[in-house]
Amino acid sequence: MSSVLLSISGHDRAGIVRDVAEALLHLNANIEDSSMTALRGRFTMMMIVCIPEDRSISELKAALAELEQRTRLTVQSQVISDEEAAAPAAEPDHVITVHGADKAGIVHAVTDALVSLGVSVVDVSTQSRASDQAEQDSVYLMVLEVVAGDQGACMREKLDAVAKKIGVDIDLHVLDEAIL
């Protein structure tokens, strides 16, 4: 079996997930991992699919080319090694939320603090929203899921320093397995 990383994007519309799943179904390919979202009228997805041994990568590429032609989606594919395919998914143990006035550098400041502790980011979502108050600029929201291990206390100190330096609110929450 071959594992392939797919990156697919295009103008958002109903049916994109179905169209991609249908193209893969005809090859009996299994969607093993995926992340999908819509951003400002664009839809994007990343997925790892497993192609059965009786199908070839060239058959997959042909099916993806037909998908692109028929749907006007943009598709990129990359075969991944058996070692990468067998790697377990990272399980986040903390959630970080950031809230404050929108300005350049927030993502860098927060992630720079995390990398200095060896904390791995598993997922990030960001959004800039217009403020409810006319005199305020846009509000920036960011949510990160991270694997911190035993760095929780150190992470809180680092994030508090970042919050003070760049003028945002940062909250840190331990993920409880019972909630998940």
Image (spheres, rainbow, N blue to C red):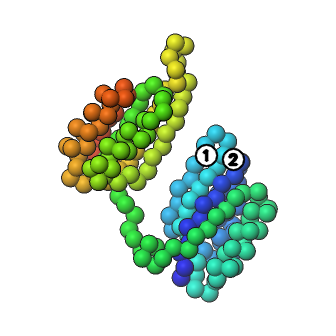
At horizontal 38% and vertical 68% (from top left) the residue drawn is 88
At horizontal 74% and vertical 62% (from top left) the residue drawn is 68
Looking at the image, residue 21 sits to the left or right of residue 110; the answer is: right
Question: Sequence order check: which comes first, mark 1 or mark 2?
Answer: 2
**Which mark, by number, is residue 38?**
1
Q: Position of residue 41 (x, y in %)?
A: 67, 42
**Which mark, by number, is residue 86?**
none
Q: Residue furthest bottom?
A: 54
At horizontal 32% and vertical 29% (from top left) the residue drawn is 165
Q: Is residue 78 above or below residue 160?
A: below
Looking at the image, residue 115 sits to the left or right of residue 26; the answer is: left
Looking at the image, residue 61 sits to the left or right of residue 145; the answer is: right
Residue 15 in which image quadrant:
bottom right
Looking at the image, residue 26 sits to the left or right of residue 147; the answer is: right
Query: Visible in this render: residue 104?
Result: yes
Tell whether label 2 touches label 1 (CB within 8 Å): yes
Q: Tell me the crowding category of disc 2: few under 14, some 14 to 19, or many 20 or more residues within 10 angstroms, Cα based.
A: some
Q: Tell me the crowding category of disc 1: few under 14, some 14 to 19, or many 20 or more residues within 10 angstroms, Cα based.
A: some
Query: Visible in this render: residue 93?
Result: no
At horizontal 66% and vertical 54% (from top left) the residue drawn is 9
SS at circle 2: loop
Q: Position of residue 91 (x, y in %)?
A: 35, 58
Q: Residue furthest top?
A: 135
Looking at the rendered structure, the kind of residue marked 2 is: Asp
SS at circle 1: strand
Q: Residue furthest right?
A: 70
**Which mark, by number, is residue 12?**
2
Looking at the rendered structure, the kind of residue marked 1 is: Ala
Instruction: Give the camera-side residue of 103 and 2.
Output: 103
Measured in 3D between alpha carbons, the distance from the residue under mark 1 to the one under mark 2, in whole angstroms, is 7 Å
Q: Position of residue 52 (x, y in %)?
A: 58, 81
Q: Is residue 9 above or below residue 58?
A: above
